[in-house]
Image (cartoon, rainbow, N blue to C red):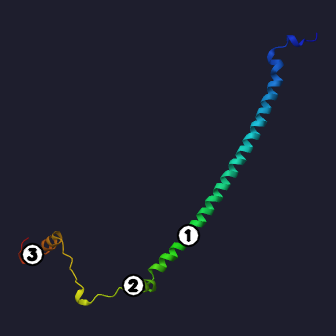
Amino acid sequence: MARNRKSQSAATRFGPALKACLLCLLIGGSGVGYVWQKEQISKLGHLVNAREIYLHTMEEQNEKLRKQLANLRSPKFLETRVKDLGLVQPPLNQILRLEEPVPETNRMVATQRYATRSDRDLLQP
């Protein structure tokens, strides 16, 4: 005897439709994920490219400033600048040389170190 559709269970009737729906969701989700991933890779590629360009410009600017600093430190430039400002070497009688005072602690240590070496210390055991 042939079975009637009305006598079939609901799971049997909706099973193929559910499988088709899940398969479409899987394929559609994979496609959306693939496109999203490609877009992220593209954005990151542009970001890396922009950062490399920025790095290159900073390296060029750094090299330019390094050359400028070397030029400003050169004796030839400094002599020219001194002449432009009208600076001259002061006479020797205007130069005052000061000795730096030795701190007290260093003097005490030095005297203590040498004060212990005496003939009396050598004779006593």
Marks 3, 1: nearer the viewer: 1
Query: Do the residues bearing badges 3 and 1 touch, measured as CB atoms within 8 Å?
Result: no
Q: Is residue 113 left or right of residue 33?
A: left
Q: Is residue 40 left or right of residue 54?
A: right
Marks 2, 3: nearer the viewer: 2
Residue shown at 85% from the left, 13% from the top = 8
Q: Give residue 1's quadrant in the image.
A: top right
Q: Residues within 10 Å of mark 3 (few under 14, many from 20)?
A: few
Q: Give residue 53's quadrant in the image.
A: bottom right
Numbered badge on residue 25: none
Q: Give residue 30's quadrant in the image.
A: top right
Locate residue 25, reporting x and y percent: 77, 32
The quadrant the C terminus occupies is bottom left
The amino acid marked with disc number 3 is Leu
Q: How many numbered discs? A: 3
The amino acid marked with disc number 2 is Val
Q: Which residue is mark 3?
A: 122
Element at badge 2? helix
Q: Earlier in the sequence, mark 3 or mark 1?
A: 1
Q: CA distance from mark 2 to mark 1?
A: 28 Å
Residue shown at 71% from the left, 44% from the top = 36
Q: Is residue 58 left or right of residue 83?
A: right
Question: Most extreme residue toward the right, as rendered?
Answer: 1
Numbered badge on residue 82: 2
Numbered badge on residue 61: 1
The amino acid marked with disc number 1 is Gln
Residue shown at 67% from the left, 55% from the top = 46
Element at badge 3? helix
